[in-house]
Image: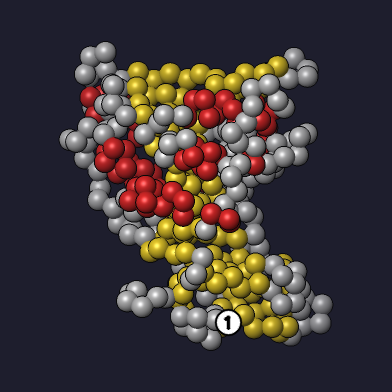
Amino acid sequence: MSETSLSITTSCILSLEMPYSEQLCIRRTVYRGGDGPRAAIVTGIHGDELEGIYVCQLLADWLQQLARENPAGLVGTVELYPAMNPLGLDTLTRAIPVFDTDLNRNFPGSPGSDLPRRIAHAAMENLSGAALVIDIHASNIYLREIPQVRINTDFADRLVPLAQRLNVDLIWLHGAMTVLEATIAHSLNSIGTPCLVVEMGVGMRITPDYCRQAMSGILTLWKDLGVLAPDVELPPPDHFPLIADDSNVHYLNATTSGLFVPVIEHWTDVRKGQLLGSIVSPLKGGVLDEVRSPVDGILFTLREYPLVYEGSLMARIMARKGGMP
């Protein structure tokens, strides 16, 4: 392959016959520019999470432009997997329809098993050995998340330096017991293929600013890894993540059922005792409970869907540690 060539191909990593004269195809687009490292973006594992699909569209546009204007700028390979759960995306459901199972609880999968495990196996076979895989998720329809990377502490030494270049606002380190082993990220990291989990925005929606922010960080990482040529010009990162862990993340759960009305913006500096919102009664009127911050910190998760039941998550706050700005 000449140093100035850039090929673009689309293919199925798994193709299965459907019950009535139709075919299920898990598609990917491959941009190949040279013998450099291979990077991959995976989205659509959950059918009600659309933020990552838009990131794939932004990256595809960028790569198409690169192919026209500077094909030598891609010295490695990029793979985009925008719809790992196409049936879920078609029906806007988190799980795989009919099987009613979460694809991200079926890794590493099996080639001779049911559909979810066959999809998982095909994904593992194709992603294994990549220099970096980024698995992009949105939150559910109830919560809005600031762009963040979630990392199992077992893999923190390798992944945190990568995450710090991804232009996100937060890196959340989870203890090993809180991260399920049957996810794509845990399965890939366990075999030595680095995988970062990005979560941002809200379910069933896209947040264009968040998606562009993520795209900028992805391009920066690709250049760091040698997927893009050193002379490819990129804007410098403009977001520098704070680091949270299980010791300084506080969950605010509803003490009663009602309508949650926030009085504060997402990704805001808060003080202990500050009013974040109220739970009010649509039936009788009045305030049922005031929701206040238990600590000084940063509000990084805020409820998007206003109806709450007792115990519903309304917010997460990262408490400030000594020396944190």
Task: Say above or below: 227 vs 150.
Answer: above
Q: How far from the left and from the top, in percent, is residue 116?
A: 67, 32
Q: Is residue 144 left or right of residue 171?
A: right
From the viewer's perspective, is residue 103 above or below residue 164?
above
Residue at the extreme left of the image, as rendered: 231
Q: Residue 12, image x and y in percent?
A: 55, 20
Would you place residue 254 above or below residue 57 in this image? below
> Residue at point 52% right, 34% down?
82
Q: Secondary structure at mark 1?
A: strand
> Residue lying furthest right in this view?
283
**For the N terminus, which image quadrant?**
top left
- Give the residue drawn at x 41%, y 52%: 156
> Which residue carries the number 1 mark?
292
Camera sees residue 68: no
Residue 262 on image: x %, y %: 59, 74
Work out whether residue 7 or residue 224 is closer to the camera in this orientation and state it: 224
- Residue occupying image coordinates x 62% and y 80%: 291
Residue 111 appears anywhere in the view: yes
